[in-house]
Amino acid sequence: MHPPSPAAAAAAMDFSQNSLFGYMEDLQELTIIERPVRRSLKTPEEIERLTVDEDLSDIERAVYLLSAGQDIQGTSVIANLPFLMRQNPAETLRRVLPKVREALHVAGVEMQLTAAVSFLTILQDESVSVHTYAHSFLQVILLHLEHRDAGVSNAWLETLLSVIEVLPKDTLRHEILNPLVSKAQLSQTVQSRLVSCKILGKLTNKFDALAIKREILPLVKSLCQDVEYEVRSCMCRQLENIAQGIGTELTKSVVLPELIELSRDEGSSVRLAAFETLVNLLDIFDTDDRSQTILPVVKSFCEKSFKADESILISLSFHLGKLCHGLYGIFTPDQHLRFLEFYKKLCTLGLQQENGHNENQIPPQILEQEKKYISVRKNCAYNFPAMIVFVDPKNFHMELYSTFFCLCHDPEVPVRYTIAICFYEVSKLLNSGVYLIHKELITLLQDESLEVLDALIDHLPEILELMSTGGESSVQENKLSSLPDLVPALTAAEQRAAASLKWRTHEKLLQKYACLPQVISSDQIYYRFLQRMFTIMMTNNVLPVQKAASRTLCIFLRYNRKQEQRHEVIQKLIEQLGQGKSYWNRLRFLDTCEFIIEIFSKSFFCKYFFLPAIELTHDPVANVRMKLCYLLPKVKSTLKIPADKHLLQQLEMCVRKLLCQEKDKDVLAIVKRTVLELDRMEMSMDAFQKKFYEKDLLDQEKEREELLLLEMEQLEKEKQQNDGRPMSDKTFEKKRRDSKTPTSLPKNIPISVPGSSSATPSTSKEIKKSKLIRSQSFNNQAFHAKYGNLDKCTTSKSSTAAYTPSVSGLSKTSMISLTDDSFRMRNTNSAPSSFSSNTSLPSTSRGTGNSVDPKSSGSKDTQPRKATLKSRKSNP
């Protein structure tokens, strides 16, 4: 093969260039062709025709546009009709509505749909009386019911059905029921008869049983025997409404025979409608009707369902739980077993056909069939709690566990998602047998789909509580000791949520993790979750996620049972957040302070966080100082006079410095408002005051619980030293159960929390023993409430209430805080420390005048003085 000659190469080059220029010429021609089209859309004549005088009133403009305007302008007027009715109903009815009637005679689909919606809106707005509405609008609605377009006809029908709800009986009889007699005849169109069926179903709720029997039931029977299967199916679905209107006796004598006959209809859609109506009416019929009439029909329907269309299986699987519940008690053992096996077969429908083929190679019919099978299995998962009731929870392991296992491991996400939603209901039904589904909980927590995880964590606290308190025996062992994979599954779930873009799922999961002190040990939380909360707070870019981690960390700290660990966490909060180089971390420290005020006692906040918080008044970034100003009223509410007089002086000194030295105008404006609010605040006293009694009582309870944590730790250390071996969780739980739980905490517990980490124990053995019993009793009592109470404290309070602080707001916060003190605690085991810092914490003890140097509580960085945004929000 010879190379092309230079001439041929040149010709080829010319050809390609010519082609290129040819394409450009074609594009230019297309542009020239389009130009006249654009000009034709904006001709002077049309612009003149679309122009409306600006001096016209709304009514005059509407009349003009409906008379001489374009269709799009008329549609706009009709869409604005509810506004005109609210503004000037009399003129609208007199001048605009006649023009609307004329326009609807020749209107297109869009204008018809708009009119149906506008008429319904006028009814809902109650712009005119019912009598006026019926006189002005009802005939227009009835006129367009049989529009040739099915969508338009359905829109007008929905409007009419809503109108029927409010019309008086006389109007309904003369305007709707009497004309319906002729509209329901066989000589009318199918669409007219379908509309008649739906209207009859609605009218039965407006008339008494005698009128229904005399005027409506003959039409119902006629339509049930219609020659078109669509009409029979439509009328069959309205029999439920009719049965509720005519009562039990007429239902048995008139409706039930029609349903039985329709259940044997040649049309599958008619049989399906009869089956669904029978299931929905099961409560009306007595035991004899159910066993002798309905049960044979149901059995026949189920037996033929696998030979029929898959859509019948979808409906059957959806109603199966309701059906089994309604027929429960009339099944023979053999029938009971048959229905159970039928349900099990539906739960695995389509799974046997999977052969690993590529989806591109599967015919479309098979793919469509598989989608229907997925819907069947999804409906089975939805009905699983009802089937547990059907077989009795005691027989769950023998009868339904294998089915539950298959649903939890189903290859399709919608099925696993549905069973995850039902998991809490299943756990409640199993009660003491909840241990049987421990492994399935781990499986769903480790599911690769975040949708499944999101569905499961909605009730995760309640599920974990049932797992921790349920079991074969009534004696509770140590918390979830039989479920060693729980903690790894929880941590893996959080990491999977964090790696995704679904930050709302991540936020919800962190919020639900606040229940963990209720179900796992303090050491497990400390070594597996606390550090992770710190990492999220410092590295995550989504503000709601950071706040959720901050609040959960505060709850972990609240119920940590080792003082050394608590001190390390507090120190890390102050050093890495409060004194962090990033102003974003310092903002999160202020969020954490707000959660500390909400969850802990006032003395705890004053001891550890008061000085580091007010030190941020010297922060170089305006956003930090601004956020602190919003928080200052809550900070002041933690002080008690005269014990915290020295802290009050430091607070006042910081506020004065802000007033005198602040140069940012936005911060200065907030400081001035905050000063006025601080001046209006009334201080709490050491002694109980009547106006603060409720808040002081709640705070005292928190202080007592915090003190008992210290006493419990000290007494456990002494017991370990005396016995030479650590107290096991099982022993601790046993002693806690053996001790009697008092109805109220002992009054001889001091209110103030000691400043040192180790409280000096009493030398008397009897006193030590009573303290241990009291501490164990507290451990059993104080955390008895469910985690659901904790969710009542809104997570977003830091972004709303903190910016509008008030005395009443503080009272609400304190009232809610008691619900956060209702977690059970866990005996801790010795383990190596995960935090490296062991230095002493800056603290402020009440009743003393000593305080930490403010300069040691914060560090100023070299960041710009004023950030670009005053408050940073996360993008959804």
Image (cartoon, rainbow, N blue to C red):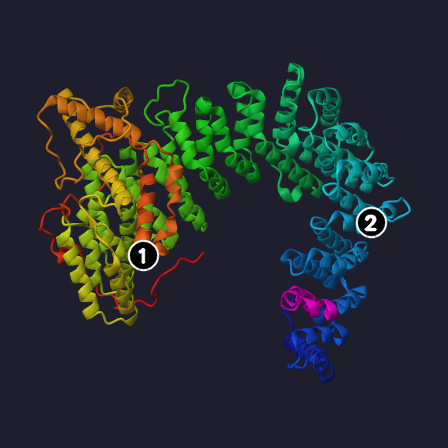
Magenta residue check for 76:
yes
| Distance from the alpha carbon under mark 1 to that under mark 2 | 63 Å
Q: Main secondary structure of the magenta part?
A: helix
- Camera sees residue 414: yes
**Mark 2 or mark 1, which is nearer the start of the sequence?**
2
Mark 2 residue type:
Gln
| Residue 277 horizontal/vertical position (percent) | 72, 34
Residue located farthest toward the top when viewing the structure as drawn? 333
Using the image, determine if residue 40 lies above or below residue 364.
below
Magenta-colored span:
75-96
Name the image quarter holding the C terminus: bottom left
Q: Quadrant of residue 781?
A: top left
Q: Secondary structure at mark 2?
A: helix
Return the residue at label 1.
805
Residue depicted at 69% across the width and 38% down the height = 369
Taking depth in this image into account, of 783 and 649 the one nearest to the observer is 649
Mark 1 residue type:
Pro
Q: Are marks 1 and 2 in contact (CB under 8 Å)?
A: no
Residue located farthest toward the right when viewing the structure as drawn? 187
| Residue 293 horizontal/vertical position (percent) | 75, 23
Residue depicted at 19% across the width and 37% down the height = 563
Return the residue at label 2.
191
Magenta residue check for 184:
no
Name the image quarter holding the N terminus: bottom right
| Residue 396 horizontal/vertical position (percent) | 52, 21
Q: Secondary structure at mark 1?
A: loop
